[in-house]
Amino acid sequence: MYTQSRSSPDGRSPGSSGHQSRPGNSHTAPRPQAQHRSPSLGRKNSASSMSMENIQSLNAVYNTGMSSYIDPISSPTHVPRSGRSSPLRSPAASGHSRSGSFGGSPLPARGSSPNLPASSSADTVTANMASQLPHSHELRQVRDNVMVDLQSQTKEMQRENSALRKEIEIKEGKLQSSMNSIKTFWSPELKKERAIRKEEASRLALLKEQLRVTSEENQHHQLTIQALQDELRTQRDLNQLFQEGTVKPGTSCSQSDLDYETLWSENERKNKELFLLRKTVEELEIRIETQKQTLSARDESIKKLLEMLQSKGLAMKSMEEERGDYDRVKSKMIEAEAKVTHLESSLEMRDRDINNLKEELLKYSDNSHQLRSHGSHSHHHMQRNGQQNDLPKVTALQAIIESKEKKICQLEKQLREFEEDLMSLRSNGAVSSEEREEEVKQLEVYKSHSKFMKNKENGRYTSDDSNSSQPLENVTPLSPRAEAFVLDKIDQLKSELNKKETEMLTMQTKVDTMHNQLKDQQQHIDVLKESLAAKEEHSKILSADIDSMRMRLEEKDQLLEKKNKQISSFSSEKNKHSSELTEVKDMMDIKERKITVLQRKNENLEEQLKDKDKQISTMKERVKSLQQDTSNSDSALITLEEALSEKERQIERLKSQRERSEGERQEEQDNLTKENKELKDKLETLQNELAENQSNLLDLKEHASSLASAGLKKDSRLKQLEIQLSQKTEEVNELEMQVKRQARQVRAAKESVEQAAANKEAAEKSGMLEDQVKQYRDEVTRSQQEVDRLLEILKEMENEKHEKDLRIRELERQTRDSNKKLASIKHREQTEKKKNAQLLEEARKHADDQSESSQQMQLKMGVMDEKSIVRQKEDRIEELEEALRQSVNITAEREMLLAQTQAGKQTVEKQVEELTQEIERMKKHLQATNAKLASTSLSLQEKEDRLAQLRADRKKQLLEVMEMKQEALLAAISEKDANIALLELSSSKKKKTIDDVAALKREKDQFVQQLKQQNQNRIKLMHDNFDEEMNGSSVTDGQGPSPDQLNTQLLGMLEDLQEGQRKLKAYIDHLVALSLEKDKTLLEGLPRTQQDEVRSMEKLKELDYNELLEEYRRHEEDNASLQLYADTLLQRIADHHPDVLERVVMALEGAG
């Protein structure tokens, strides 16, 4: 086999070396051996293409942050997970690596392609999680079987490829030896055939490159299969972990069973996809077999040519046989082209499968986000219960989700590489087809010329024979020696003429082919320039859209600030009203305390009156005893007079006390009348407020109805706009398809010169279509602006609804306060009524007692004068009547006040009932409006989500545009390098070719500068997107993330930047050491960039948010300067010392 024939650098074979690599216990991956390069003309071409591809791969590594370049200082104990060699290799050494596995189980290889670096951190995290989490036995068995089959197929394909390469190299060596032996006696008539053989050798080199590309594609597909299997494994482990974390005592296992069933169905679908990928591998094997057949056919043709050369016969029959062989080779090449087209179709099918896999990966990422939210919920629940043991699980899940996102990015980059390979294959196929057409033309011209020369010679010989047959009477005969000499001279002149004519024809055909190639290249450059201009215009349009979105965000910020100010003013007013209400409540409490004090005084006076009544009853008993003893002594009269005097005194005292109590009662009545008046005023104010609230409620009802109608209109308008948007997007897609078709037609029309007018019409049509596309895009932007305006209106409606809810709550609170005040007034009136009734009853009793005592006194004191007694009685009666009148007036006034308060109370109760009914109606109406607003808010949320998705798509499109520009520039650079290599390989070293090489180099330098500028623009765009995301996350919902979260995010980003900067510095130091070892002049004019000291993570954690932002920007500037330095140094090394560049690539392979 081919791998056994290769020798290691120390002279031993890889199989017999002492440090043989084993899959189970190897600590170092085997270095890839350099492929044996053929000493043919393809050596320079391969070297030049190798340097350019290495530069492209290194630029891609810089763009991704040098994650594949591993610093030996940072990872001294890094153990590679498989025995697969590094992906950063030269085109000549690709396709000979062997993939190792641990115990037969597949492991994902790191660094599958130059543009697809895998992060070591994500791999270690997934490996740790895979070691910690349990696996199901059935899935593992199915996966192992599938991977064993794939590995066996890949090994067989690699063996066949190595055998084919070995056979091709042996045949090339034989051809070169035979060509070197034949060069000594090479005839001028077969120089053309030698050129044809050279062209065949170049085509064989192209076929070798195609074989290499197919082998690399096979490796890429194997790596994608392994990545998908790893993702399946991590997804299954995640689900099992969540099942273990969420299923607790008391919870049901139904959800976990459903999740397991869904995961099982997804696993079955993945198995089907693996089956499809296996079919694609079989198609690749068929392709390799077809290439074997083509190579065997070429070997047969080469053998026939060698036999013809060994026979050394220069007859026309051998030339015709060689032409027949050449025609056969040409037909086989056409068949190979058809097979290449078939393989391209199969590659397109594979791309579709990969897109489907990408969609499924996006679904898995959505599921992972849901699982992350579910994990955060379970984490909070466990914190509540005091169980903090699952914190590392949640962090591990987050790390796995991040690794999935990185793998998705890697798959996207891999798709882009496949597209680049397809473009390169198509370009190679186009060039080879043109060259074949030119060769067919040359063969036809050569055949016609040879036939013409044969006819001419035959005519001359016949004319000579006819002339010789005529009688030569007048011509003197020549000697035989002279005739032989003349004939030899004529033959020599004929052969020289034939040679010169053939050389002239070949030179003319070469000149025509060179002119045609230059025209095609200029047309291709014009098409590329037009596409670049169109992409730049599209990027400008997108930047304008981004600016408009920023303006909208600023306007929304201003609106939010205004709303916050209004809320603060409303809250201050609410606080004022609450303070006033507390003051009123305090005043009412003070008045209630005064009323209780007065009630206690009245109770004390009543007790004193009761005591006096008891004394009067005792005195009555004594009078009765004295009346029995009047007849016995006059002393009783004296005692009676004294008792009467005492009673009069007591009556006077009681009168004075009564007057005082009446004065106090009058004061209390005055106070109560004042309080009643104040309460009436408050009732009037409350009634006015209620009327205002009723009017406000009516206004709110009208406004809510108008808002509902406006919301319905806006919903209908939004639906119409969505329909128009969908229609316009469809029209835009149709127009883009038409534009693509027109572009294809224009390219086809440019190849033919006769269809110039048709080309003009197509260009006009394409211009019209582009104008229509711009108009539709403008309409789409206008519709988006209309949607934003409607969203702002709906937000204002929601704010107004919130304000109205607050007003309704305040009105309800005011009605409750008024009800409480009315209840307190009723209670006071009842107490006053009871007190007045008690006072009237006491006055009546006192009057009756006084009348009875006066009658007794009249009977007992018959001795005294009747006039004085009558006068006293009249005075007493008048006083009592006056007291009764006053009491009756007071009671009447109080009854009137009570009647008025009751009437006012009834009216207020009626108003309150009406207001409660209206409030209930308003509540029902508000509930209906809330339901409508909820539906509108849901629709708004959906539309906002759609807008967010459109914005994200826009950002993705911008990044894709930048990537497409980079790919176009890389393709142009590679094309320039190929043209330069072709011109340098040409044997003619004329001034024109040298000028062409210089012009191509200048154009290449311009493309390199444009590529650097494009990289800087892409970095700026990514930073702008990051700033917008940070601003958007702080603005959404009026609640931004906490400072701790922002600081943690910035710390993680700073850590990534420091890691990339450290690796860039190590790589630059390696380049500087190599350039100092090789040529010190490479470092002239490149002063080393001065960076500030890198702070540790402990110091960074102590910084604020603004300081962290400044530190992040400083690190970005340092990384940009380091990347520019590395780019310039690499470009100098590639221009002056490509062998040093090969050493750099080998160092990268060893580090990877």
Image: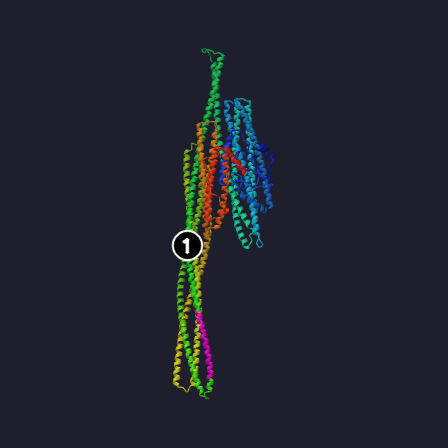
Q: Which residues are magenta?
A: 594-623
Q: Residue at x 57, y 45 (%)?
A: 130
Residue 85 visible in the snapshot: yes
Q: Is residue 657 above or below residue 938?
A: below
Q: Please give the count of numbered marks on the rendered protein.
A: 1
Residue 649: percent from the left, percent from the top?
A: 42, 80
Q: Which amino acid lies under the numbered mark 1 shown in the image of this protein?
A: Lys
Disc 1 designates what residue? 565
Question: Where is residue 175, by image quadrant?
Answer: top right
The question of residue 609 being in magenta is answered with: yes
| Location of residue 604 with respect to 946 vertically, above or below | below
- Residue 415 visible: no
| Residue farthest toward the bottom in the current orientation of the protein | 632
Assign a secondary structure to mark 1: helix
Query: In x, y percent, where is residue 730?
Result: 45, 43
Judging depth in this view, the residue of 437 and 666 nearest the camera is 666
205, above or below 310, in the image: below
Query: Camera-side residue: 153 or 1031?
Result: 1031
Q: Viewer-proximal residue, 1127 or 269?
A: 1127
User: Where is residue 88 drawn, in percent x and y?
Assistant: 52, 37
Task: Name the image quarter holding residue 859.
Answer: bottom left
Q: Quadrant of the C terminus?
A: top right
Q: Dominant secondary structure of the magenta stretch? A: helix
List x then y, in percent, for residue 968: 46, 37
400 up-or-down from 168: above or below:
below
